[in-house]
Amino acid sequence: ETKKPNENRQTLQQLLTHLLRALERRDPQQLFAWPVTDRIAPNYSRLISKPMDFETIRRNIQSNQYTSLNAFVADFKLMCDNAMTYNQPETIYYKAAKRLLHAGLKLTGPEKLKTLLSALP
Ligand SMILES: COc1ccc(C(=O)NC2CCC2)cc1-c1cc(C(C)=O)n2cccnc12
């Protein structure tokens, strides 16, 4: 049946919240949980033009900022790319970002999404 737009939005929101939780579990040290401050990362705000973190992504989901899965994935990739731009390859942050990015792209890949979408109401 033709779903009302807000119903679709709720389904998308539920899917994104599920994906966000699955991604956050892959960041046990919570290095991506909150915005990076200039205090813990000197000159961060000068070097990274569009910061992104899991808390901001959560707020975007709740305020219906993402109208597609792609928009959510783009912010997740931005968060990982920022960490691989600011931090040197040998740091725990760069390595964590690389692992997280691969895990995330697998999670939102077509085959995995098919199973997820088939489980939706
Ligand atoms: C929300 O950001 C953080 C929160 C907590 C920690 C942290 O607990 N760091 C301790 C683990 C080794 C020192 C690090 C960070 C952190 C993330 C990042 C990222 C994501 O680039 N970062 C870069 C340089 C220095 N610190 C960080």
Image (tube, rainbow, N blue to C red):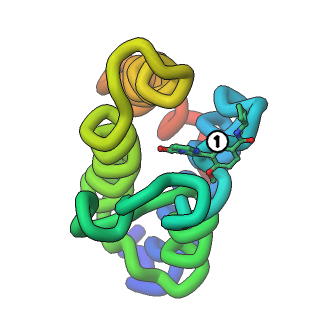
Q: Which residue position holds label 1? A: 31
Q: Quadrant location of residue 55?
A: bottom right
- State the image quarter where residue 44 is shown: bottom left
* Residue 58 versus residue 96 in the image, above or below: below
Q: Is residue 7 shown above or below 85?
A: below
Residue furthest to the top in view is 90
Question: As drawn, is 87 to the left or to the right of 25?
Answer: left
Q: In this view, does 35 lie to the left or right of 71?
A: right
Work out whether residue 96 or residue 117 is closer to the camera in this orientation and state it: 96
Q: Which residue is drawn at 31% across and 47% down?
A: 82
Image spot of residue 74 (x, y percent): 27, 52
**Relative to residue 113, is residue 92 drawn left or right?**
right
The answer, for residue 80, to whether it is visible in the render is: yes
Question: For disc 1, does the CB lie below 8 Å from ligand 1?
Answer: yes
User: Residue 60 in the image: x percent, y percent?
Assistant: 49, 76
Q: Quadrant of ligand 1?
A: top right
For the point 35% across and 69% down, the residue is: 45
**Against 4, is 10 above or below?**
above
- Is the N terminus in the top left, top right, bottom left or bottom right quadrant? bottom left
Q: Decide: few, some or many residues near mark 1? Use Cα within 10 Å; few <14, some 14-19, many ≥20.
A: some
The residue lying at 53 percent from left, 86 percent from top is 63
Q: Is mark 1 on a helix, strand or loop?
A: loop
What residue is at 47 percent from the left and 75 percent from the top? 9
Q: x, y (%) of residue 68?
A: 30, 63
* Residue type, numbered disc 1: Leu
Residue 77 in view here: no
Is 109 in front, or is 75?
75
Report x, y in % for residue 13: 55, 67
